[in-house]
């Protein structure tokens, strides 16, 4: 049976899928630059290594109420027939291989015009207990409603040109359907887009730093004097992991314990058909392994060894000049110093850069015994 890989993501509590072959990259949502005279669902643009990409808000594209963005939101870059666009999603989940016979192309609701019921959906996929809505990229990117259809779209988001759509007896349809949202939304959305106006100064700084990193990532990757780090949290402390050894980030789910292995071996997880062993490096760093639940993993590949390093949280990706790195403080005990490369500042906190190669090869993490 023919199967296709789909990137699964969450938006507004629903599961969505897009064919993985059209996904070019994924990163956390950066600060967006507003664009004049753009369609209402294009909420801004980003400078991605010298290429200006439009960014689409799926809520506005579907005609739903606009929601404030969060620092945990992600951006998926899609390329469809030489058109590249980024979409904002709440959370990227995983890649699933879905067989053709598990997809229902269309649902019938008994309406007179079923062809108008799903403008942007290619079908519905059954995956175990979940139903995943699959995007029709051609419609999502190219489709523009005619005047009659546009007047029928009723949305409290109403950004700009559609804010006054749908008049009935002198009343806006929005007022009847979303009376609590109309006044404030109409006031905010009748003005040019302001990216995350209610974000805290700390959140705005994170968004801005991400945008700057995306703009300069090409230059920085080509410079031997710079290094890229994933900032992670273990027991409330910040650490840096060199992206040179990182393959991807993933959420931890459905872990199968491995019998007769040390406590540092959390278990195995199925990652898109690959059995990934999850390891806890806190004991190697002389940290308690009894506190804090670790919900995310960083998949690293070192000397043909592929493992998932479990962490409490993945905060950000940062880029540093080697001149910004400092030596390991003498206050750290010898056991910790052996597995650290350097220290650096991140948002007024000191992060320790981990030497993962030494941790995995000499820290007793790898289990060689046969049982």
Image (tube, rainbow, N blue to C red):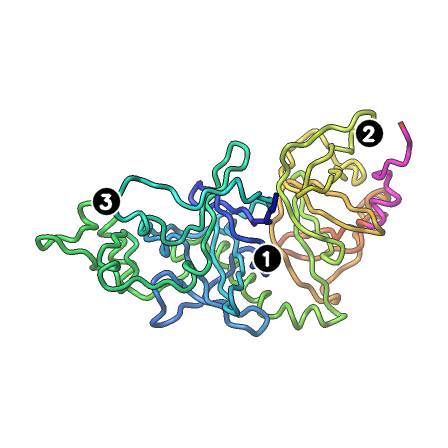
Mark 3 Cα shell of 10 Å, populated few (<14), some (14-19), many (≥20): few
Which of the labelled discs sits on residue 21, or is there none? 1
Residues 299 and 81: in front is 81
Lower position in the chain sequence, tag 3 or tag 2? 3
Expressed as whole percent of the image width and height from the top left, the position of residue 275 reads 74, 39
Q: Determine the secondary structure under disc 2.
A: loop
Who's the residue at 74% across and 61% down the image?
325
Q: Nearer the viewer, residue 53 or 345?
A: 53
Mark 1 or mark 2, which is nearer the start of the sequence? 1
**Residue receiving disc 3:** 180
> Mark 2 — residue?
262
- 91 within the magenta span: no
Give how far apart the Cα atoms at labels 3 and 2 are: 56 Å
Residue 303 horizontal/vertical position (percent): 85, 52
Return the residue nearer the eye: 223 or 303. 303
Q: Position of residue 249 (x, y in %)?
A: 65, 48
Q: Residue at x 60, y 46 (%)?
A: 3
Q: Are marks 3 and 2 in contact (CB under 8 Å)?
A: no
Say which quarter of the image contains residue 268.
top right
Q: Residue at x 41, y 59 (%)?
A: 139
Q: Secondary structure at mark 3?
A: helix
Residue mark closest to the camera, 2 vs 1: 1
Label for residue 305? none
Identify the image quadrant of residue 55.
bottom left
Residue 104 drawn above or below residue 135: above
* Magenta stretch holds residue 366: yes
Q: Is residue 11 left or right of residue 347?
A: left
Q: CA distance from mark 3 to mark 1?
A: 41 Å
Structural distance between the alpha carbons of marks 2 and 1? 39 Å
């Amino acid at each position: 049976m023919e199967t296709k890989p789909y990137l699964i993501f969450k938006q507004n509590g629903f599961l969505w899928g897009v064919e993985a072959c059209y996904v070019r990259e994924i990163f956390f949502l950066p600060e967006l630059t507003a664009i004049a005279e753009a369609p209402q669902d294009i909420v801004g643009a980003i400078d991605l290594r010298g290429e200006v990409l439009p960014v689409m808000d799926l809520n506005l594209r579907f005609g739903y109420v606009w929601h404030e963005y969060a620092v945990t939101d992600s951006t998926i870059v899609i390329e469809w027939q030489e058109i590249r666009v980024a979409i904002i999603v709440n959370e990227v989940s995983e890649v699933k291989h879905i067989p053709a016979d598990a997809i229902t192309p269309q649902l019938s609701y008994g309406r007179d015009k079923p062809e108008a019921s799903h403008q942007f959906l290619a079908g519905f996929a059954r995956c175990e207990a979940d139903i995943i809505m699959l995007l029709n990229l051609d419609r999502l990117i190219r489709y523009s409603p005619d005047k009659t259809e546009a007047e029928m779209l009723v949305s409290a988001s109403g950004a700009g040109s559609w804010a006054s759509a749908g008049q009935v007896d002198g009343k806006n349809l929005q007022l009847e359907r979303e009376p609590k949202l109309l006044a404030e939304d109409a006031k905010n959305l009748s003005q040019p887009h302001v990216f995350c106006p209610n974000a805290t100064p700390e959140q705005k700084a994170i968004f801005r730093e991400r945008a700057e990193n995306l703009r300069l990532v090409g230059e920085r990757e080509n410079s031997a004097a710079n290094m890229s780090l994933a900032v992670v949290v273990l027991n409330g402390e910040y650490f840096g992991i060199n992206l040179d050894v990182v393959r991807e980030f993933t959420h931890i789910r459905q872990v199968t314990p491995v019998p007769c292995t040390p406590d540092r071996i959390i278990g195995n997880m199925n990652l898109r058909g690959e059995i990934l062993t999850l390891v806890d490096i806190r004991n190697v760093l002389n940290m308690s392994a009894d506190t804090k639940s670790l919900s995310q993993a960083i998949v690293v590949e070192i000397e043909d060894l592929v493992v998932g390093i479990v962490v409490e949280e993945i905060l950000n990706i940062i880029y540093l000049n080697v001149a910004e790195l400092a030596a390991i403080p003498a206050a750290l005990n010898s056991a910790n110093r052996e597995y650290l490369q350097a220290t650096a500042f991140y948002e007024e906190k000191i992060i320790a850069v981990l030497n993962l190669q030494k941790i995995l090869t000499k820290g007793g993490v790898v289990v060689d015994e046969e049982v």
